[in-house]
Image (cartoon, grey):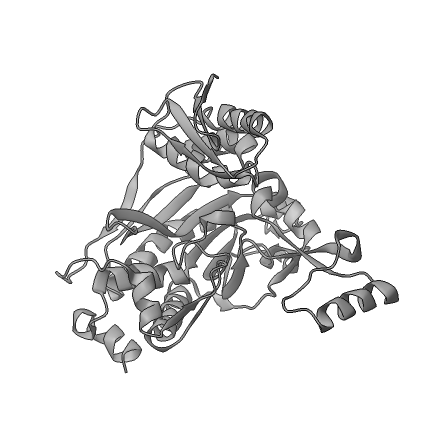
Amino acid sequence: MNMHARPANEVLLELPREVDIEIAGDIEKESVFVSPFIERIRIEPDLKTARMTMKPGAPVEEIAGKAKRFLEVMVRQVSGFEIKVFVETARRDQGPYQIGVNQGLVERGWMHDYGKGQVAYSGPVLKLARLINDKSGELYAQAFGAAEAHFPALVDAETLHKCGYFDSHPNAVTFVGNMVEDFDAIEEFRRANSCSEGALMPPHEHIHVDGMCLNPAACFPCYPTLSGTTFDTGRAYTWLGRVFRYESRNISGLDRLYEFNVRELVFVGDDEYVRDCRRRSLNVVESLATYFDIDCRIQTATDPFFATVSAAKKFWQAAQEVKNEIKIPSLDADGNVKQLACGSINLHGNFFGRRFDIKDGAGEPVQTGCVGLGIERWVLATFTQHGFEPERWPKPVRDVIFA
């Protein structure tokens, strides 16, 4: 891989092979995790070259070496798998898509963006978020007899390890730390902040990481509660989960948050039951999209794994067709249509059954599957497709959120 000299903070790197648009997008998104000195890696239009922009003062040779290793593993990904579309809905609203939804919500006082991947919302945004959650929960109860549940936002690192998250998505994990139980360390921290103009963080040696994390996937806390359970018949559970995924510089309004809400559905049972639930969940999501009158598509997809394992894990997911993604059209900052991933429908095989000792009626590890709907992304996509004027919204929705 050759490196071409550019301005002091910019380097052009030749890729080992030409990539397609899908892999180019993955490279650009994941490049924020290569080095804190890198502003961004962009793939050039020729799809054979990467432009790396670095912060002033960055050690160029060292950072270029990391970038090369990153690019070498990322280009190994195999793409070109046939994308199968299982559901496609078309909205009745004939109005144009609304550009600048995030800013528009802020200007109307319906949303506050803290700028770190967290948002607060009220008014029609809050009402819509609640309606999406309530309506999907209602549909899950009708279709699957799903029992309501609740789980904490904190999850033990051992659980994430069992779930394979540290191997697949280590870059997205948020560890929870607390002050060490030391009188002098705590007093030093207190005194430093008693007269400072801004918050002062304690030194690293005064922070204790005790193995708790913020939950990065809504379904994970469910499985430890089922350990040692035998399911003679299939069961389904549903809840609203608080989810945290570190996104570095990729955060952007409701498009990509650090902290967000997911209406989760988990089904547990034998292979026939779980596959039937996944099949029927397509109809449930279609009903939800029709209720909110939005363009929506459900299609085969893969997850964004960490670079060094991405090629192998994406290939397996695509080959086995275990992940279906809920794509809802939205707009980027320039007004171009983009397909926003607003949820997924997944098969896990007996992975969680084996890891958490959950068995079916035959004494075998259970099969599991799940459906996750990203509430804030559904909010963004729905406002994009209907705009801010109440008369464009379907009446049952309008009567609730603009009341």
When asked about the image quadrant of residue 290, the answer is bottom left
Side (left or right) of 260 relative to 20: right
User: Where residue 376 sits in the image (x, y, percent)?
Assistant: 40, 62
In the rendered view, would you say 373 is above or below 16?
below
Residue at the location (12% across, 60% down)?
94
In the orientation shown, which residue stands out farthest toward the left? 94
Image check: 267 left or right of 171?
Answer: left
| Nearer to the camera, 139 or 342 | 342
Where residue 62 sits: x, y (%)?
A: 60, 27
The number of callouts visible is 0
**Position of residue 86 measured from the top left corner of the image (x, y, whole percent):** 29, 45
Name above or below for residue 35 compared with residue 346: above
Q: Is residue 241 visible?
A: yes
The residue at the point 51 percent across, 33 percent down is 310
Quadrant of residue 364 in the image? top right
Residue 305 seen in this snapshot: no
Quadrant containing the C terminus is bottom left
